[in-house]
Image: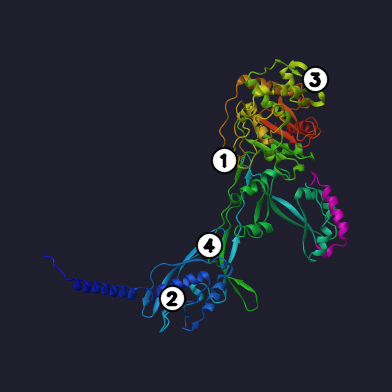
């Protein structure tokens, strides 16, 4: 086709005409858009519903009477009731249908209820086109929900889920509902608050085993005087068996009141308490910290596994949305049928490896120990943690897993294994055990300054000679203790399902520091759990991470350690047996149930030799264990007797 050549003037005129055509086309698009249609009003209404600002819209009621935007906002707030703090998500589900001056738009309303429960449904918004002011929303309570009428409000009914149990190694519940008695007083019936306080205190002190911590009722008279006369002023909650011990003493005291109920509790008050934690009604702190998670009356895990796995154990609460209306006389009426119901989801159990009888034996072994103490027991064959006990002096602290304390001479188990691996000693090789030994000006001594002279190394171990280990320290090398300790799991990253301190072994340092580290002093620190696992490794011949929480399974359990050399570990086992037969733990020689192997330890924790912790680690049969008593003096004074009580109470 022939090309047509235009003059410059004609080309300019054509461009102007084309631009005008574009403008006309644009004007036609705007005229056909929804800028003056019902879509804009519906979207503005939904946005204003959530924000609370509806001033840009016009409203009428179904009769056509005008409504002020403030009236509609107030009624939305009132109808929302207990859901008002969390406005729903709102959106159109399609384009409005227009019939002459009326339009209908589908909308989706989705509420988020406590516990992240979703309640969604479809509604319709009707609009009418006014003569001068565009599309007006026809407002009535049914816009929010078809069953709502004027004066109604939405309310929540919460249904608590069934809290699941912590299970033992056999799959049986450890923590289950058990009967308790809440002891309180009614102020209007108290005749002598001071005397009542004395009588209650004396009765509570008579409970066996003793209530720990000791009950302090010194503020009770003040609480009574400041309370409502008809109030129930709670004093103490006791297990039913403990209450029965003192029932006759307190039942008829003037003003005393009693309420019975069931609480989720372990078999005994002391049973693995620091490990498990407790389950109690939600406190004010719980409600303030987690208002969307807890409601008044909910059971909440506090401390230990109950707290760490609270979400798993407690499950998901159910919720119902109901309609309530206040009658003219002020009474409230709730509709029989809820608008929505989400059933509660029960919690999932938490399975542990704890053995009830072994745990009872461990708790009993520490029951009379007023100092802070801990005992951990591990099954050698599979690494299952059978008991995690903390004495009453620990006051709820889980020393068994969290203590960071010097191991004292129990660490000679690690030093000896390292020396045997290096060929520095043999079972019957003779080594000097002087009364004192000096390293770079620092003097080391034995307990009671004993002097064995030149004797077989097995005797050094059995009698716990410090000076010989101080003298042998250079043969360990600056990293030797730490390297051997790691083969026994020390300093490792374990995944037990709860926090645990796995130890820190001294490395390098000066000559005196290395000498002190050789017999568990210096900067080496451990926990009873770490030492129980290391002892189990010696008995087994290989370290394996202990198992405590098995469901849910640990995400990242530590890999097993290397196989221990038989030519090193066998002599070590022989020496640990001799500690009991002829050495520092002869008090355990006659316990029932087979031979006991072990090592005592007395650990200085400051520069005063009189300040010492007491230790014993060992095994009998398939059970390895560690006993620790803070400020317990020599091992023979506290740790060894506690080990004896434990072994004598073990199930056979």
**SS assignment at label 2:** strand
Instruction: Give the residue number, with chain letter if any, for mark 3.
Output: 451
Q: Residues within 10 Å of mark 4 (few under 14, many from 20)?
A: some
Instruction: Give the residue number, with chain letter if any, for mark 1.
Output: 554
Front-lying residue, 209 or 46: 46
How many numbered marks appear? 4
Point out the tag, 2 or 4, that comes first from the N-terminus. 4
Query: What distance separates the C-alpha of mark 2 from that of mark 1?
Result: 56 Å
Q: What is the x, y in percent for residue 254?
A: 85, 60
Q: Residue 194 colored magenta?
A: yes
Q: What is the x, y in percent for residue 244?
A: 79, 50
Point out the tag, 3 or 1, that comes first from the N-terminus. 3
What quarter of the picture does the C terminus occupy?
Answer: top right
Q: What is the x, y in percent for residue 651?
A: 70, 33
Point out the tag, 4 or 1, that comes first from the N-terminus. 4
Q: Nearer the viewer, mark 3 or mark 1?
A: 3
Residue depicted at x 67% and y 32%: 531
Query: What distance separates the C-alpha of mark 2 from that of mark 4?
Result: 25 Å
Left-right relation of 377 to 65: right
Q: Residue 519 colored magenta?
A: no
Instruction: Give the residue number, with chain letter if any, for mark 4.
Output: 112
**SS assignment at label 4:** strand
Point out the tag, 2 or 1, that comes first from the N-terminus. 2
**SS assignment at label 3:** loop
Point out the tag, 4 or 3, that comes first from the N-terminus. 4
Which segment is the magenta one?
186-211
Q: Which mark is residue 126?
A: 2
Q: Nearer the viewer, mark 3 or mark 2?
A: 3
């Amino acid at each position: 086709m022939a090309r047509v050549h235009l003059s410059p003037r004609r080309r300019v005129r054509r461009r102007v005409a084309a631009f005008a055509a574009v403008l006309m086309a644009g004007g036609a698009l705007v005229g056909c858009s929804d800028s003056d249609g019902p879509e804009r009003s519906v979207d503005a209404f939904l946005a204003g519903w959530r924000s609370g600002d509806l001033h840009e819209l016009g409203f009428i009621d179904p009769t056509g009477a005008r409504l002020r935007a403030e009236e509609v906002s107030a009624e939305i707030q009132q109808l929302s009731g207990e859901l008002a703090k969390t406005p729903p998500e709102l959106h159109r589900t399609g384009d409005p249908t227009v019939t002459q001056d009326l339009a209908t738009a589908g909308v989706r309303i989705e509420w988020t209820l406590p516990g992240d429960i979703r309640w969604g449904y479809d509604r319709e918004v009707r609009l009418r086109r006014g003569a001068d002011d565009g599309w007006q929303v026809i407002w009535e309570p049914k816009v929010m929900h078809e069953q709502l009428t004027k004066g109604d409000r939405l309310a929540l009914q919460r249904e608590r889920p069934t809290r699941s149990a912590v299970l033992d190694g056999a799959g049986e519940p450890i923590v289950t509902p058990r009967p308790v008695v809440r002891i309180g007083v009614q102020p209007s019936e108290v005749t002598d608050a001071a005397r009542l306080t004395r009588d209650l205190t004396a009765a509570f002190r008579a409970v066996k085993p003793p209530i720990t911590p000791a009950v302090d009722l010194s503020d009770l008279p003040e609480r009574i005087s400041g309370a409502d006369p008809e109030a129930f002023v709670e004093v103490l909650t006791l297990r039913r068996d403990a209450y029965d011990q003192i029932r006759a003493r307190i039942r008829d005291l003037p003003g005393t009141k009693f309420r019975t109920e069931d609480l989720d509790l372990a078999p005994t008050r002391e049973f693995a308490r620091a490990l498990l934690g407790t389950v109690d009604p939600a406190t004010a702190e719980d409600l303030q910290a987690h208002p969307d998670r807890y409601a008044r009356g909910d059971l909440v895990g506090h401390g230990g596994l109950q707290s760490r796995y609270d979400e798993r154990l407690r499950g998901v609460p159910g919720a119902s949305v109901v309609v309530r209306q206040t009658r003219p006389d002020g009474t409230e009426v709730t509709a029989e049928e809820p608008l929505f119901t989400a059933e509660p989801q029960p919690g999932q159990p938490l399975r542990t490896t704890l053995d009830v009888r072994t745990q009872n034996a461990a708790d009993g072994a520490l029951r009379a120990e007023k100092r802070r103490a801990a005992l951990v027991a591990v099954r050698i064959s599979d690494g299952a943690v059978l008991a995690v006990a903390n004495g009453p002096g620990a006051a709820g602290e889980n020393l068994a897993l969290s203590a960071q304390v010097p191991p004292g001479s129990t660490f000679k188990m690690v030093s000896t294994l390292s020396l045997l691996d290096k060929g520095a000693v043999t079972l019957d090789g003779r080594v000097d055990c002087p009364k004192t030994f000096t390293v770079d000006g620092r003097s080391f001594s034995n307990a009671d300054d004993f002097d064995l002279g030149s004797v077989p190394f097995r005797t050094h171990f059995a009698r716990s000679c410090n000076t010989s280990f101080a003298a042998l320290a250079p043969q360990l090398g600056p990293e030797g203790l730490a390297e051997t300790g790691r083969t026994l799991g020390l300093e490792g990253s374990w995944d037990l399902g709860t926090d645990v301190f796995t130890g820190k072994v001294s490395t390098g340092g000066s000559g005196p520091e290395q000498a002190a580290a050789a017999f568990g002093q210096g900067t080496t620190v451990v926990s009873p759990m770490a030492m129980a696992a290391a002892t189990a490794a010696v008995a087994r011949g290989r370290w394996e991470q202990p198992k405590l929480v098995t469901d849910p399974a640990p995400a990242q359990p530590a890999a097993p350690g290397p196989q221990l050399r038989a030519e090193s570990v066998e002599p070590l086992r022989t020496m640990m047996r001799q500690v009991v037969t002829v050495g520092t733990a002869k008090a355990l020689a006659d316990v029932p149930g087979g031979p006991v192997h072990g090592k005592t330890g007395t650990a200085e924790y400051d520069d005063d030799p009189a300040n010492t912790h007491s230790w014993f680690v060992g095994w009998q049969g398939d059970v390895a264990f560690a006993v620790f008593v803070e400020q317990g003096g020599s091992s023979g004074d506290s740790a060894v007797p506690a080990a004896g009580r434990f072994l004598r109470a073990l199930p056979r």
